[in-house]
Amino acid sequence: MHPVRAFAATALAPVALIALAALVGGGWIWAALSYMTLLAFSLDRLITRIDPPADPERPLPSADALSVVLGLAHFVLLALTIRALATGGLGAGPWLALYVAAALFFGQVSNSNAHELIHRPNKRLFNLGKWVFISLLFGHHTSAHNKVHHRFAASHDDPNSARPGESFYAFAPRAWAGSFVKGYEMERADIHRRGTGGATPYVTYITGALGLLILSGLAFGPWGIAVHILLAAYAQIQLLLSDYVQHYGLARARDPETGKLAPIGPAHSWNSRHWFTSHLMLNAPRHSDHHSHPARPYPQLVLHDRREAPILPASLPAMAVVALFPSLWRPLMARALVRFEAGRTETTG
C-alpha cells in the first residue's frame, strides 16, 4: 500500500461526514460524532498492527498534497459548521453533537495537520498551517512551537511541557499565556539579531484572528462570532491536552556548570502505538521521532521501541480524556513512568 493512502482514508473520511452533518443534519451528525469518538476508540483497540515508517529516501509529494487538502478543507468545514450552529434549526442534542464532532476534528486533525505544515520549508505550506492556527485564534502557536517548544521541550523553560504532578487545569493557562509571551520574545530577539527591524508575526496572528471573527459576524451575525470562539476554544483545549500528555513528567538533564540542556532524545516524549488515531492525527503520536527530526514528513516518522521511548497506556485522544481527571491521571502516569524507567534500567544494566 502507498505510505500515504491509509492517512488519507482515515483523515479525509470525517471531512465528508462533518460536511454532510453541517449541510444535511440528521443521522450524518451522529455518524460524524461516532467516527471521532466511538469508532476511533474501537478501531484503536481492534487494529493491533504497527505500520513501519516510509522509506526516508523516497520523496513523498502526496504527503504534502494531503496536508494541503486537509488545510483547505479545514476552512470549508469551519464555515459550514459555524453556519449550521449559528443560524438555528438544530435541537439541543444535534447542536451539541455537531459542535463536539467538528471541534474534535479541528482539535485533533486540523491542529495535527497545521503542526505538520508549519514544519515544512515551503513558504506556502508554512503559511497555510499558520492560517489554520490563526482561524482557531491560536496563531501564536506557530512561533511558540517552532522557536520555544522545540528548543526547550521537557524542561521548565518550555511553557508547553507539563511538570510532574501538575494538573491539566494548572497547566493550560500557564502554557497558553507562557507560550504567547515567550513566542513573542523569541520573534523580537530574532528581529533584533538580524537587524532588520519591523513588526513580528504577532501582528498577523492578532489582526488575522480579529478579521476572521468579524467575517463570521458579518456572515452569520453575533451568534457566528460566538460559535467561532466556542469551536476555537475546544480546539485549543485539544491542542493543549496533546502538549500536556506528550511531555508530562519527563525532563531533560541540565549541565550544572553551563546550565545547558542535554540534547532531546526519545526518552523525552510520550508516544502511542495505536494505528487508527495515529493515522487520523498524521502520526502526531510518534512524538519522540518528531522532536529528533522536526522536518521529517509524517509518514516517515519512526515509532521507537518502548525501552527507548515511553509509551502511553492508551491512545493519545483517550489519554487526553483521562487527563481531565487528575485523580485518575496521576497514578496511571506514575505507573507508566515507573515501567519505562524499569525497562531502561534492564536494557542498560
Image (cartoon, rainbow, N blue to C red):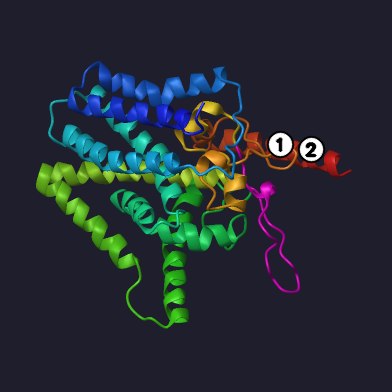
Residue 325 pos. (x, y %): 52, 35
Residue 244 pos. (x, y %): 53, 46
Between circles 1 and 2, the one closer to the viewer is 1
Rounded to the nearest angstrom, the CA distance separating label 1 from label 2 is: 8 Å
Check disc 2 and give the amino acid type.
Gly
Rendered view: 314 above or below 246: above
Disc 1, SS: loop
Residue under label 2: 343
Disc 2, SS: helix
Name the residue located 37 percent from the left edge and 42 percent from the top edge. Answer: 235
In which quadrant of the rendered image does the C terminus lie?
top right
Instruction: Between residue 283 and residue 176, name the one nearer to us.
Output: 283
Instruction: Between residue 89 and residue 187, name the one nearer to us.
Output: 187
Residue at the far front in the pictured view: 58
Which residues fall within the magenta stretch? 248-271
Query: Mark 1 and 2 residues: CB-CB less than 8 Å, in contact?
Result: yes
Residue 315 painted magenta: no
Residue 252 painted magenta: yes
Rendered view: 144 above or below 233: below
Check disc 1 and give the amino acid type.
Arg
Name the residue located 62 percent from the left edge and 42 percent from the top edge. Answer: 270
Q: Left or right: 139 with respect to 157?
A: left
Q: Is residue 175 visible?
A: yes
Q: Which mark is residue 224?
A: none
Q: Is residue 284 visible?
A: no
Name the residue located 33 percent from the left edge and 51 percent from the top edge. Answer: 128
Residue under label 1: 306
